[in-house]
Image (spheres, rainbow, N blue to C red):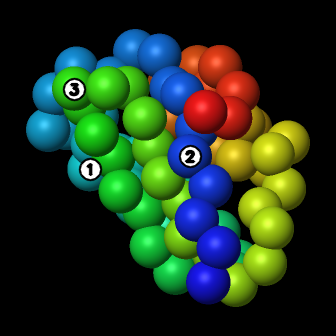
Amino acid sequence: MPATTYAVAGMSCGHCKATLTKAIGELDGVSGVDVDLGTGHVTVTSAAEPDDAVIAETVDEAGYELNGRV
């Protein structure tokens, strides 16, 4: 399964990590989400190439800002 890493701004605590893990994890095809607060990266593991627009919208709705792929 491919993994795609995104840079996300605004994450600073365990609540941020839990919020993004839940929100992105509920998307169709996503099998795993790894949030690294230290680097500001979110790695999404999915069955197929993720739709960046859908990921960006989900991150935005959760209150954070997607700055693109790493």
**Residue designated by label 1:** 18
User: In the shown orientation, is residue 15 left or right of residue 10?
Assistant: left
| Front disc: 1 or 2 | 2
- Kindly indicate the quadrant of the structure image that contains residue 30: bottom right
Mark 3 vs 2: CB contact within 8 A: no
**Residue designated by label 3:** 38
What amino acid type should be assigned to the residue bearing mark 2?
A: Thr
- Kindly indicate the quadrant of the structure image that contains residue 27: bottom right
Residue 53 coordinates in the image, percent (x, y): 85, 42
User: In the shown orientation, is residue 32 left or right of residue 26?
Assistant: left
Circle number at residue 64? none
User: Disc 1 or 3, which lies upstream in sequence?
Assistant: 1
What amino acid type should be assigned to the residue bearing mark 1?
A: Ala
User: Disc 3 or 2, which lies upstream in sequence?
Assistant: 2
Residue 2 coordinates in the image, percent (x, y): 65, 73
Query: Badge 2: how crowded within 10 Å, few (<14), some, or many (20+)?
Result: some
Q: Where is 40 relative to 36, above or below?
A: above
- Kindly indicate the quadrant of the structure image that contains residue 29: bottom right
| Front disc: 1 or 3 | 3
Distance of label 3 from label 2 (alpha carbons): 14 Å
**Residue designated by label 2:** 5
Distance of label 1 from label 2 (alpha carbons): 17 Å
State the residue at coordinates (48%, 53%): 43
Q: Where is 25 relative to 16, above or below?
A: below
